[in-house]
Image (cartoon, rainbow, N blue to C red):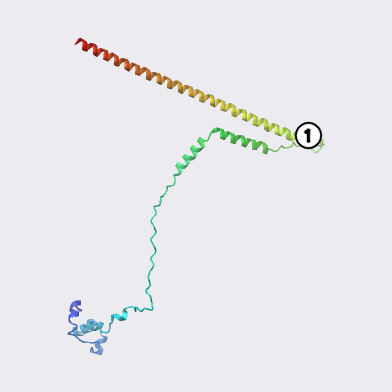
Amino acid sequence: MLLGSLPDLYQKRALITLSVNDVPFRASFRPVFLLNDDLRQGLINNTRANYFVEDYIQCEAADFPAVVKTRKKPKEWVPEITVPEPFRLIVREQNKKEKNMKSQSEIEVKHIGLVYLQVTSKKYKSKPVSYNCNPPMPMISSRGREPATGSSEEKKTLKEERNRMLTKQKQRMKELQKLLTTQAKVYDSYQSLAQMSTSKVKSLRKSKKEKMKEYQREL
């Protein structure tokens, strides 16, 4: 190597005491690799001649107090629970179950309310009359009859629907009673079969015991 290792340079500092002023004027403008070995080593050794560490140390005066950095307290770790959202298919199934779970009586009651609203919201249209005829003006009595007829028709429709509801409920009650009776019969038959089987098993055991006793007596 041209420059040599670092420990060799520090050892030769005491021997070579050349400075930049001792180097010829022309040599100072030449690049380092064109100089002689002695001149090159002199330049390298005198690079730190006027270097003082105190110039680069920050002043520690009493006027400027030391800045203390305030560290923020770390936040406490809190475990977060992530609740997964249900799938769309599960939501659809839940909605279907809710619709099916609703009793039919509620649906029918809503239907009755809708029918009542339709009946009440109806506007009785007048029949078209020719311009030649001069119908008589409605009297007070006829004016009072119109709302009475409308209310009677509404009452009839509501009564018919209530009667239908009652008949349907009666039919359902009868069907439920039939199902209960059939289930009770099946249960009774099952119990009777179980009793018969237990009685048969007991009789067989008794017969076996008697046979064993007779065989022992013969021996």
Q: Quick one: 130 or 183, which is closer to the camera? A: 183
Q: Is residue 169 above or below residue 95?
A: above
Q: Quick one: 75 or 125, which is closer to the camera? A: 75
- Can you give x and y, in whole percent of width and height, for residue 119 in the image? 66, 36
Quarter of the figure with the N terminus: bottom left
* Total number of numbered discs in the rendering: 1
- Can you give x and y, in whole percent of width and height, for residue 115 in the image? 63, 35
Q: Is residue 78 left or right of residue 178?
A: left
Q: Seen from this angle, which residue lies furthest front?
A: 62
Q: Quick one: 127 or 16, which is closer to the camera? A: 16
Which of the 4 image quarters holds residue 31?
A: bottom left
- Can you give x and y, in whole percent of width and height, for residue 215 in the image? 22, 12
Circle 1 sits on which residue?
Answer: 142
Quarter of the figure with the C terminus: top left
Label 1 element class: helix
- Residue at 52% in and 25% down: 175
- Can you give x and y, in whole percent of width and height, for residue 36 in the image? 19, 84
Q: Is residue 66 left or right of residue 167?
A: left
Dot 1 amino acid type: Ser
Q: Residues within 10 Å of mark 1 (few under 14, many from 20)?
A: few
- Residue at 55% in and 33% down: 104
Q: Quick one: 2 or 45, which is closer to the camera? A: 45
- Residue at 49% in and 40% down: 95
